[in-house]
Image (cartoon, rainbow, N blue to C red):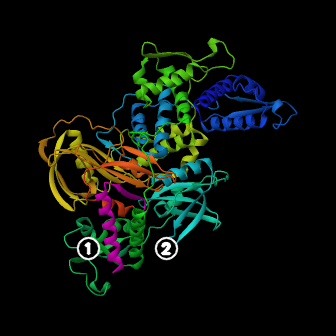
Amino acid sequence: MSLSRTERLLNLLIALLNTRYGLHRSELREKVYHDTSANDVAFGRMFERDKNDLRAMGFEVETLTDLGWSEDDPATTRYRIGKESNRLPDVQLGPEEWTVLLLASQLWERAALGTAAQSALRKLQASGRMAEVELPAGVQPRIKPAGQAFDDILAAMHARHPVTFTYLAGTTGKEEERAVEPWGLGSRFGQWYLMGYDRARKAPRHFRLSRFTSAVTTLAREQYSPPVDFNIRAELDRLPELPLRTAVVDVREGHLLALRRRAVQGAPEQVPGHPAEGYDRLFVEYRDPEVLAEELASYGPDALVQEPAGLAAAVRRRLQAASSFSDAPVPAYAFADTRSRTARKGTSEDQLKRMLQLVPFLVHNQGLHIQDVAEHFDISREELEADLRILICSGLPEGYPDDLLDIQWENDHVFITQDLDLKKPVRFTVAEACALLTGLETLNGLPDLPGGGALESVTLKLLAAAGEEGLQAASIAGPQVAPADSRTHATVRRAIESGSQLHLTYLSPQRDAVTERDVDPLRLYSLDNTWYFEAWCHLVDGLRNFRLDRTQDVQPNGAPAAPHGPPEGGVPAKLFTANDDDTTVTVQLTRQGRGLAEDYYAERTAELPDGGLVAEIRFGNTAWLPMFVAQHGGSARILAPADLASAARDWLAASLASYDR
């Protein structure tokens, strides 16, 4: 959508909002579109697209017809937008309610729902000032959606389009093409599932996103209707947990301490013969073979599955896919700029949505410094001034100066004196309602949640404000965020609150070693139900992140934590902290794996024609990169430096050779 279309849509919106009886298409064509061409068909298509865009932004475009005439006659059909039907009702929140709402809005680490949550929060803030609140000390729970497939299915589900994808069936172990009408997305047993109607089988089915073996394709020309009152959480609660099984894995002596910790006692006669020289035989319990296969593939030649055969085949399939991708020709690419992938380039649709939030925010916050306004909307001053210049040129068609939006910021303080009925924020979109309401539901498992009954009260208020859009929140269910080890979580949290230093014994899988260190804890955060804490580590004299489930022991050592100031980066917290001596690695990612660019904070990216991308990522420890390539089974490969790319190929070749033998 070009900039001129952004202005046109804004003027169309203002015109439809400020008419009581409605405007004929011919009037809109002349006064808003200034279209004098004779091509009625082209104009009709453009007008229909614009109406659909306004509806997608939350505005209900009403169609009125003269008595006795049909809607098919443009000459007797009028259009308008009701001034109240599209507005977000006033939502009054107290400090404790704002606290839990802020936690809920920050849950989504990235992807479409993360943007939607922040947009919904700004709409609530637009009608008044947010109460001064203090979030729990150092606690940032987060949800990590399942990559690009999650975003693609979510967009298709909200637009009610079917999707197709290739799926590895758990019962047969074969890849199959599936065409599905998506009804809901939810997390269960630590995995994300799609629930929907399988067109080939003519029945509802569930699909685990980690078993997708292709990118998701949206059938944008087709529509479907989901079941009334569908609830994804209720459906997933009916799924039985997979049975517990035991894998037999030969592990190189002195390696893979994390896997050895999970090993159980097994019967030697389970597998005939003995492990090869230099290997130990371990017995590892698991439920889902694909989850364990992903882990074991990353260990390469250091781990060899003996039983069951299906698990061994799953590991070998991942290794072969990674090897084939690593040997493929390098595509032509060019980095567009130095902007981080996480700073998503804004579209014109984003700009228009932002401007519709900007006007009511300025109405209720007169005289703010222009830099404060820009920071509130997470944009630069230049981007904000571009928004303001469009706004002051917009207004009623062929109106007088008083019929234009009037905004002034010459002295760096922004004032608005004419708002043209844009002073109330637009009602929540489906994505915005889902992001906040699903986030609030997910917080139920967070220990020591502040506010007592604030979670329930703010949920009821948002449900009432969201209306029909809020009912669709039942199509998404987040994971449980309660930490598995509540004692360790509580110990770290108390140390953050009291400013105390901790002594911990920690297992590092990348270094395959157990170390002891003293740390100054800064904050706790999670990815789903996996909890981490960021701390200043005195052993390496730098910031590090530690998983709670890899912390073997943690106790206060009696010393106060050194003052380090608040953690940098805000929300979300970063798993990886860049250092000056890091190695810049060029990585190619498929469309399925492109989310890794955001996970590892790529500094530059280059789009590829097939939907994948090339990313420059900084790594402090490059020795584990072959494990990284193997783990992602054909979704990632190293392009440069050449020695790292060669090491990854050698690692994969040695891994495949161990299975071929």
Apparent side of residue 308 relative to residue 123 in the rendered image (left or right) = left
At x 48%, y 44%, the residue is 113
Relative to the observer, which residue lies in front, 531 or 162?
A: 162
| Kind of element beneath mark 2 | loop
Q: Position of residue 41 (x, y in %)?
A: 77, 37
Mark 1 is on which residue type? Val
Examine the rendered structure and indicate whether residue 410 appears above or below residue 516.
above
Which residue is labeled 1 in the image? 251
Q: Residues within 10 Å of mark 2 (few under 14, many from 20)?
A: few
Relative to the observer, which residue lies in front, 633 or 245?
A: 633
| Kind of element beneath mark 1 | strand
State yes or no: residue 645 in magenta: yes
Could you give the CA–CA distance between mark 1 and mark 2, rounded to whole angstroms? 26 Å
Q: Is residue 288 visible?
A: no
Apparent side of residue 28 relative to residue 594 in the rendered image (left or right) = right
Between disc 1 and disc 2, whose residue precedes?
Answer: 2
Q: Position of residue 284 (x, y in %)?
A: 31, 73
Q: Residue furthest left?
A: 558
Snapshot quadrant of residue 250: bottom left
Residue interval drawn in magenta: 634-661
Q: Position of residue 321 (x, y in %)?
A: 43, 67
Which residue is labeled 2 in the image? 173
Q: Position of residue 410 (x, y in %)?
A: 45, 13
Mark 2 is on which residue type? Gly
Apparent side of residue 526 relative to residue 59 in the rendered image (left or right) = left
At x 52%, y 73%, the residue is 174
